[in-house]
Amino acid sequence: MCSAPKAPKIPKAEPLPEPEPLPTTQQAPPPPPIAPVQTMQAQPVAPSAPPPVPMSQAQAPPPVQVEGQSTDQPIVKKRKSKRKELQQASKGASALRIPLTKKLGSVASGSTGSTGLNIPS
């Protein structure tokens, strides 16, 4: 039978030498006193701009019908319900998703093709 391992013998540590004292730093002289701030008097308000001169009384010309422009009113569509909006949004997003049943690079024969990643399967 083996006996339990013995603890290694550690030599006694030598005392550390006394640390050297740090050099004393000289204190910077105090900053010169700051002169008190003088209060500024408010400057007189500049005169406001003169009122705008009224434009000549000529009015804008009447609207002119452009060729090819129809005279019927534009068709305003009824607003979709929130549910319909969400359904339409999810249809568009589903085209961008890869279904979980399909594997990337799968071949019709059933063997897996190259996935484009260097990962052994």
Image (cartoon, rainbow, N blue to C red):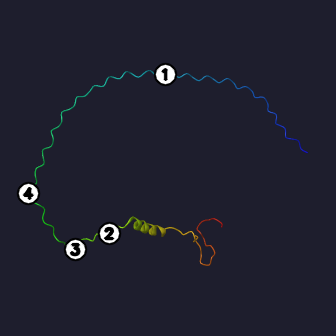
Q: Secondary structure at mark 4?
A: loop
Q: Which residue is mark 4?
A: 57
Q: CA distance from mark 3 to mark 1?
A: 88 Å
Q: Secondary structure at mark 3?
A: loop
The foreground one among 40 and 62 is 62
Q: Which residue is mark 3?
A: 72
> Of all residues shown, which one is farthest toward the right?
1
Q: Which residue is mark 1?
A: 27
x%, y% of residue 84?
40, 68
Q: CA distance from mark 4 to mark 3?
A: 33 Å
Q: Quadrant of residue 68?
A: bottom left
Q: Which residue is mark 2?
A: 78
Q: CA distance from mark 4 to mark 1?
A: 79 Å
Drawn side of residue 95 relative to residue 14, left or right: left
**Residue 86, placed above or below residue 47:** below
Q: CA distance from mark 2 to mark 4?
A: 42 Å
The foreground one among 111 and 87 is 87
